[in-house]
């Protein structure tokens, strides 16, 4: 009889997938909706403000082509801490179960470690979404220990009744107030990327005032990516509607927006896909995560 594997060891073993995933400019389906039943591309031209942002971004595209593609990133993790009333845990192969926030913390920790192995120049900050507010948790730092300590202090917020709407206005207002963005088209010292990790299945995100978000997205060195961690899709939740709304954050057509249900391996794989530098990656709809040598060659294995 062998000892049962430590659940933490099993979680860590999943992180090895980070090193195997690369982004190449190939065609494949992306922006899949929750459940993965059918691929869909979110049409982001849903408002006049969004169209103006896109036109501004197009006007700056030539400037971006002259920017070095390896400038340091400042990445802001916006972590949703709300645990809804019908929340189900992640279950790994050993049978151990973990709440979504626990898994989200661990994949962020692994992301920071993997990204730091690529370049030590990147910095990270942490924010948290609660049921009624948004708070800045950790200022920009390149110290992994500081980041992990701050992550571990984040606690989930248990709600008694599922809300139907989440206002993201305060989140991007806070970012707009605290983060000084560079507008120089010649040689910016860094770019800023928000990675929003949203985990509610009954609460549709929206803006009561989108001016701060619009102003941020007009900056050519500001990016927003999304990871939507949701329950299994059913008639009793709003997963499809939430995912569609999150897709509208991609106003410049350069965001990466993913969804994952209660599958630990998929969550790790998804975070691995966000390791790519925004100036080095293709649009999400043009990505492929299969090495070209395997795409062009029939591989046979003996078992």
Image (spheres, rainbow, N blue to C red):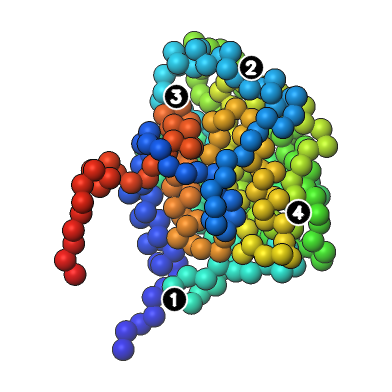
Tell me which numbered mark, 2 or 3, is placed earlier along the sequence.
2
Provide the secondary structure element on which disc 1 rests: loop
Tell me which numbered mark, 1 or 4, is placed earlier along the sequence.
1
Seen at 70% across and 20% down, the residue is: 52
Observer-side mark, 2 or 1, equals 2
Q: Quadrant of the N terminus?
A: bottom left
Q: CA distance from mark 4 to mark 2?
A: 31 Å
Residue 71 x/y as whole percent: 44, 24
Which residue appears farthest toward the front when viewing the image? 38
Tell me which numbered mark, 2 or 1, is placed earlier along the sequence.
2
Residue 183 x/y as whole percent: 60, 15
Which residue appears farthest toward the left when viewing the image? 302
Mark 4 lies on residue: 203
Residue 275 seen in the figure? yes
Observer-side mark, 1 or 4, equals 4
Q: CA distance from mark 4 to mark 3?
A: 36 Å
Mark 3 lies on residue: 71
């Amino acid at each position: 009889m062998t000892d049962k594997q430590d659940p933490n060891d099993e979680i860590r073993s999943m992180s090895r997938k980070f090193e195997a995933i690369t982004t190449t400019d190939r065609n494949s389906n992306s922006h899949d909706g929750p459940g993965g039943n059918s691929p869909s591309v979110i049409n982001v031209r849903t408002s006049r403000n969004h169209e103006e942002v896109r036109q501004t971004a197009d006007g700056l595209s030539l400037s971006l082509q002259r920017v070095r593609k390896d400038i340091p990133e400042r990445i802001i993790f916006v972590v949703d801490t709300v645990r809804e009333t019908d929340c189900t845990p992640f279950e790994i192969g050993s049978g151990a179960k973990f709440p979504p926030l626990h898994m989200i913390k661990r994949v962020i920790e692994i992301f920071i470690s993997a990204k730091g192995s690529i370049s030590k120049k990147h910095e990270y900050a942490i924010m948290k979404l609660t049921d009624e507010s948004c708070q800045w948790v950790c200022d920009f730092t390149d110290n992994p220990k500081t980041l992990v300590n701050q992550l571990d202090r984040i606690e989930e917020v248990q709600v008694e009744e599922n809300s139907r709407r989440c206002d993201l206005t305060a989140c991007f207002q806070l970012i707009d107030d605290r983060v000084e963005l560079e507008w120089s088209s010649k040689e910016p010292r860094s770019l800023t990327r928000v990675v929003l990790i949203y985990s509610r299945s009954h609460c549709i995100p929206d803006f009561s005032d989108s001016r701060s978000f619009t102003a941020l997205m007009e900056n050519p060195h500001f990016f927003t990516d999304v990871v939507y961690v949701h329950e299994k899709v059913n008639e009793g939740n709003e997963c499809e509607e939430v995912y569609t709304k999150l897709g509208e954050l991609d106003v410049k057509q350069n965001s990466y927006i993913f969804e994952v249900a209660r599958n630990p391996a998929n969550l790790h794989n998804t975070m691995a896909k966000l390791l790519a530098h925004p100036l080095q990656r293709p649009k999400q709809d043009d990505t492929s995560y299969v090495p070209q040598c395997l795409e062009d060659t029939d591989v046979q294995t003996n078992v």
